[in-house]
Image (tube, rainbow, N blue to C red):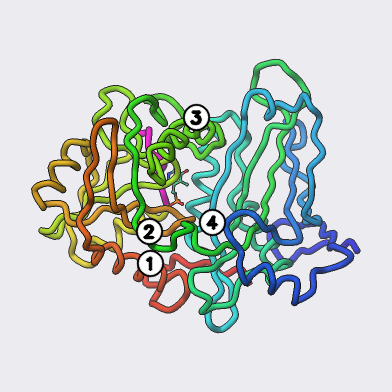
Amino acid sequence: MSTTTTSSHTPFAITERTQRASADEIATVLENPGFGTNFSEHMVLMDWDREQGWHDARVVPYGPIPLDPSAAVFHYGQEIFEGMKAYRHEDGTVWTFRPERNAERFNNSARRLALPELPPVIFLDAIKELVTIDQAWVPEAGSGETSLYLRPFMIATEEALGVRPTNRALFVVIASPAGAYFKGGLTPISLWVSELYVRASPGGTGAAKCGGNYAASLASQAEGIEHGCDQVVFLDAIEHKFVEELGGMNMFFVYGDGRLVTPELTGTILPGVTRSSLVELARERGMIVEERQFTIDEWREGVASGLITEVFACGTAAVISPVGRLAWNGGEVAMPDSHEVTMSLREELLDIQYGRGEDAHGWLYQLV
Ligand SMILES: *Cc1c(COP(=O)(O)O)cnc(C)c1O
């Protein structure tokens, strides 16, 4: 069945799956959704080429995307992505959090990777279309921290091995019901300090959300896991002493005197939406937030002296994760056991996202 919707700013041609999943089938998946392993029934596709610009917005059944083996993305890694969540509220409505930020960041990433920018209104409409048709895949309110994770991405599709910015691209949005990100629930995570590798360097792609950054982080992630850690914390590429971030999360340090420190955005750190939201929430509750350079020694000494009382990492997927241990080649240090500020900031943010608290900043955006 094919229909076109004009309910949004962008007309999407809609091809619905002929056989929709039953309520029982969906319920079985939502009982134990995992993270990023199950997908909803549809996806959004939209083409771009240099002559026509963006065209052919469509919603189609979820499935493989045919691509020529010479498509540029396979060879030179021209790919960018975003990560967002759709949250169901108690009254059944479905919302997402600050999606304009993601749309804007998507375009910043596009510019850095020489991909075409996508008008933010199309980005927002695409998400709305997908969540509308697959709304049964958004877990019920009150089921803890479950959501429908949204993954917009863009790839270079031009069939040519020549090295140059692509003349053709594909924008895609897929959706995946999500439970808690870390398997151990809220068990504090352990971090490995990578001395062999860096994530990003000045002038590089660290501030862009692109698959290449993740590809480059996997060897160090494997090294961290070999050393019994959950994640890797990356230092700056020049002096190897400033704390930057994890492979996919920003870092915060809580001081007993009410200060909150997070590494400043120097161009090598991904500007997280969660990060900037927490900076605002913390300032509003009277904390002094310092966005500045922060060294690994300051971290170790701050924990040893007791000045640092809590450490946490944050991002859309995992929300806020307390850090329990820092390990490196030749040593390790346990973080303090308190997670009071961490957990209360976490609660405040989740309350806004799930509609349990007041959305004083207008951060929520209704999808259904
Ligand atoms: C996506 C991402 C984050 C977190 O960003 P949010 O907008 O908060 O989800 C942090 N660091 C990296 C490297 C990322 O890719």
Query: In terms of sequence position, does the residue under pointer 1 or pointer 3 come before the other?
Result: 3
Q: Residue furthest top?
A: 162
Query: In terms of sequence position, does the residue under pointer 4 or pointer 1 come before the other?
Result: 4
In the rendered structure, does residue 76 fall within the stretch colored magenta? no
Nearer to me, 285 or 199:
199
> How busy is the neighbourhood of tag 4: few (under 14 within 10 Å), some, or many (20 plus)?
many
The main secondary structure of the magenta stretch is loop
Which element is circle 4 on?
Answer: strand
Query: In terms of sequence position, does the residue under pointer 2 or pointer 3 come before the other?
Result: 3
* Residue that carries the numbered disc 3 in the rendered image: 216
Q: Which amino acid type is marked by label 2?
A: Ile
Dividing the picture into quarters, in which one does residue 358 lie? bottom left
Q: Which amino acid type is marked by label 3?
A: Ala
Which element is circle 1 on?
Answer: helix
Distance between the alpha carbons at the discs numbered 4 and 1: 14 Å
* Residue that carries the numbered disc 1 in the rendered image: 349
Q: Are the two marked residues, 4 and 1, in contact with CB atoms closer than 8 angstroms?
A: no
Q: Residue at x 63, y 44 (%)?
A: 153
Q: Is mark 4 within 8 Å of ligand 1?
A: yes
Q: Residue at x 34, y 44 (%)?
A: 191
Write the start and end of the magenta stretch as one range: 267-272
Checking the image for residue 84, the label placed there is 4
* Residue that carries the numbered disc 2 in the rendered image: 320
| For discs 4 and 3, the disc positioned in front in the rendered view | 3
Query: In terms of sequence position, does the residue under pointer 2 or pointer 1 come before the other?
Result: 2
Query: In terms of sequence position, does the residue under pointer 2 or pointer 4 come before the other?
Result: 4
Q: Are the two marked residues, 2 and 1, in contact with CB atoms closer than 8 angstroms?
A: yes
Q: Is mark 3 within 8 Å of ligand 1?
A: no
Q: Residue at x 40, y 73 (%)?
A: 351
Q: Which amino acid type is marked by label 1?
A: Leu
Nearer to me, 180 or 254:
180
Which element is circle 2 on?
Answer: strand
